[in-house]
Amino acid sequence: MAKAKSVYICQNCGASSAKWIGKCPSCNEWNTYSEEVISKTKTAETSWREDSGARVHQKPVNIREVEKSSEERLITYDNELNRALGGGIVAGSLVLIGGEPGIGKSTLMLQLALAARKKKVLYVSGEESQQQIKMRAERIGIQTDQCFVLSETNTQNIFYQIKNIKPDLLIIDSIQTLHTERIESAAGSVSQVRECTGELMKFAKETQTPVFLIGHITKEGSIAGPKVLEHMVDTVLQFEGDRHLSYRILRTVKNRFGSTSELGIYEMQTNGLRQVSNPSEILISQKADDLTGIAIGATIEGNRPLLIEIQSLVSSATYGTPQRSSTGFDAKRLNMLLAVLEKRGGLRFGAQDVFLNVAGGIRIDEPALDLAVCASLVSAYHDIAISDKVAFAAEVGLGGEIRAVNRIESRIAEAEKLGFKEIYISKFNTKGLDLKGKKVNIKPFSKLKEVFEDL
Ligand code: TYD
Ligand code: MG
């Protein structure tokens, strides 16, 4: 007989404890533990000892004899989504789409559902009524008779409807609103999210139906509920962008069926999301042609490559000691780079105020931005603009040498994806790198001086 057992679970990271604790020992957050009822039928020990012969479905098979299923992919109308997924939707895969509220997750998914031609799509929403979904759909434009909408939060009811409709693709908006009868805790709690995802995963794997889950994001930027969710699903996509700007980026954070260096780019318009096939328009559109002191650096944030604009201003100091001001970049590192430029590049910053800014209000502490910072400073010093088709990715040493940085391939791939023509990197980064056959021209250097002569 199942015995109801309650445990305390950290709502931030999913760690559990038998009694309540104020501070989570695993993620150091305060006051995140809440009680959740879990009915466990057996402990791990008894289920291991017990002879479960009757329940065995799968036997170990020699790997040579495992039949290969041809990896079937559903190619959607949305090329950006196809790309982010590594070339279409894999049958039976579970995809999680995370993003801040209002960024456009529901719009993206509804648009996918509305574009269905031959496949049947079921869009389940726990957040909006069928009328609200209809209003949104009319904004986007309905062209299909294969899209079904359901406003429901109980997983058992959802599965009941699935049996009737037999969709080829299931979309859940959002996983935090679902609840299963098998667990007593409130919708959105860690154990509910975990259990509901588990049920959906079973459904996906057994019927080979792909399932998209929309997930909310906490203020720290991770998907609400636990990391556990990210471990369970096959693919995690992150939908991001500034809510006040119209551009949106769909990043692959995890993908069991493809690379994580892909990204899709959209623009939010009044009638839905438009695919942006030439992404460099984002960076270029914001920039006047010949502004000096601007250089683009290729950095890695977390595990994602990111191209970022460095701006600097050099002007003669009017009052005594010249100022050094840096926003978004380490001030000590700026001073070091100024010294290197002075000593190795012959530039005189002694009587100059220097202001440095990382555009977009982002803070980056990565040495790989050094070369972009130097380029931006030199551009500002000489008042000569650098082409906006050029990116930089290298560390600068005290001797003025250009040093290698990690994950250069992803940086180059990102620059290539965003339409850059040239990328300056370290000579020591070229080992094993295919310099040809790329749309972006790779320029390896070993000395700071050579870079600026080349520029
Ligand atoms: P939504 O998909 O509801 O965001 P999420 O599900 O991630 O919370 O997107 C909401 C925003 O998008 C909202 O501010 C309105 C805007 N929007 C448009 O600009 N154009 C459109 O065609 C649609 C449907 C929404
Ligand atoms: Mg939504």
Image: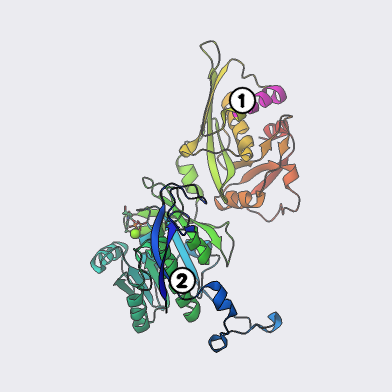
Question: Which residue is most to the bottom?
Answer: 54
Magenta span of residues: 334-346
Q: Is residue 431 left or right of residue 358?
A: right
Q: Is residue 391 left or right of residue 205?
A: right
Q: Position of residue 4 (x, y in %)?
A: 39, 71
Q: Position of residue 158 (x, y in %)?
A: 34, 75
Q: Relative to 204, is 175 above or below?
A: above
Q: How is the structure coloured here?
A: rainbow
Q: Locate ligand 1 by image quadrant.
A: bottom left
Question: CA gap, disc 1 to disc 2?
Answer: 52 Å
- Residue at point 60%, 36% (across, down): 372
| Residue placed under numbered mark 1 in the picture | 335
Q: Position of residue 167 (x, y in %)?
A: 39, 78
| Identity, as a three-letter code, of the amino acid under mark 1 | Asn
Q: Is residue 194 in sight in this rendering? A: yes
Residue 273 falls in which quadrant of the image? bottom left
The quarter of the image holding the N terminus is bottom left
